[in-house]
């Protein structure tokens, strides 16, 4: 179910941006609203990713074997990007494409239904799942008093980024306008909300972690602690942010390699260089 919100707010923003550009104030439009090239679109991402391209990236998302069949629509993705106008709209064209490739790679790994000999290759099966199957726990951190668990609720992985734990559902819901603690199921029932939670995670720094967006947009500035931990900018650092505690500071991790495989495929499709530091084998997790 798309659960689409009204689009008039995003389109009104595009009109404001267009007015500023027409008035010769491109810099104001880009700095204030995060619109770079493609600002005439209601979502700048739509200028980079057509529906046809989106469906070719996630070639088997609507396969009958995928539990998320029909859930992750292009319309829902574009609608969600309007909540975060700086997503894939920061920096030059190559930087923007690289950020898209990185985001798509991470959500593909988290939701993949692929395997080594899968039709069209294992990296064509992103967005196959919308929630964790048979979770081993309810992902409730009872020690977190700021975001207390609601009785009977499970905070297992849901959505493109597999949002997990009460301390993520709570602030995500607060930021996006739903009760993530009392109603975590909405992330697996509403595709707009599912994509918005993934973009919220992507765009929001949780210090000392930078945001994934900051890393891929070239805005990350490593601290002394980051340098000592070998946390260099690149796709590998994004993996560290997403799941470094389980996947980083170890060599030849299959999960890391799977993320890289998706990323390299998408970079090739976008005709952009993948950049340095693709893995996190020598990075200390946060």
Image (cartoon, rainbow, N blue to C red):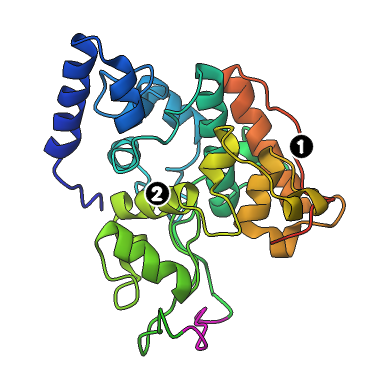
Give the vertical position of 267 relative to 175 (above or below): above
Give the vertical position of 109 relative to 174 (above or below): above
Side of 52 relative to 286 (left or right): left
Q: Which mark is residue 66?
A: none
> Label 1 belongs to which residue?
277
| Dot 2 alpha-carbon crowd within 10 angstroms: few under 14, some 14 to 19, many 20 or more | some
Q: Main secondary structure of the magenta part?
A: loop
Using the rendered view, name the quadrant where residue 247 is placed.
bottom right
Residue 24: horizontal and vertical position, in percent? 24, 9
Count of numbered marks: 2
Residue 135: horizontal and vertical position, in percent? 54, 75
Magenta segment boundaries in residue numbering = 137-144
Residue 273: horizontal and vertical position, in percent? 67, 21
Viewer-closest of 200 and 164: 200
- Disc 2, SS: loop
| Residue 285 on the magenta segment | no
Residue 136: horizontal and vertical position, in percent? 59, 79
Q: CA distance from mark 2 to mark 1?
A: 34 Å
Residue 107 visible in the snapshot:
yes
Side of 122 relative to 129 (left or right): right
Residue 115 visible in the snapshot:
no
Q: Which mark is residue 69?
A: 2
Using the rendered view, name the quadrant where residue 82 is placed.
top left
């Amino acid at each position: 179910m798309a659960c689409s919100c009204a689009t008039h707010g995003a389109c009104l923003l595009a009109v404001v941006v267009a007015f500023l550009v027409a008035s010769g104030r491109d810099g104001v439009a880009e700095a204030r609203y995060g619109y770079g090239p493609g600002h005439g679109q209601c979502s700048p991402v739509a200028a980079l990713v057509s529906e046809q391209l989106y469906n070719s990236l996630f070639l088997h998302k609507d396969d009958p074997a995928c539990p998320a069949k029909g859930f992750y629509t292009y319309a829902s993705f574009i609608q969600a990007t309007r909540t975060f106008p700086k997503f894939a709209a920061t920096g030059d064209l190559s930087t923007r494409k690289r950020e898209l490739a990185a985001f798509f790679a991470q959500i593909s790994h988290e939701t993949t239904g692929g395997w080594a000999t899968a039709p069209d290759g294992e990296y064509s099966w992103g967005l196959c799942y919308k929630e964790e199957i048979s979770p081993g726990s309810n992902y409730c951190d009872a020690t977190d008093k700021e975001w207390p668990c609601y009785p009977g609720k499970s905070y297992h992985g849901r959505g493109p980024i597999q949002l997990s734990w009460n301390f993520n559902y709570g602030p995500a819901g607060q930021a996006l306008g739903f009760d993530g603690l009392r109603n975590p199921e909405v992330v697996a029932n509403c595709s707009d909300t599912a994509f918005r939670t993934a973009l919220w995670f992507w765009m929001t720094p949780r210090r000392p972690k930078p945001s994934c967006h900051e890393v891929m947009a070239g805005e990350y500035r490593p601290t002394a602690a980051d340098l000592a931990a070998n946390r260099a900018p690149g796709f590998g650092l994004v993996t560290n942010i997403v799941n470094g505690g389980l996947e980083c500071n170890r060599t030849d991790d299959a999960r890391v390699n799977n993320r890289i495989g998706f990323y390299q495929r998408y970079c090739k499709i976008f005709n952009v260089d993948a950049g340095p530091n693709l893995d996190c084998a020598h990075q200390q997790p946060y």
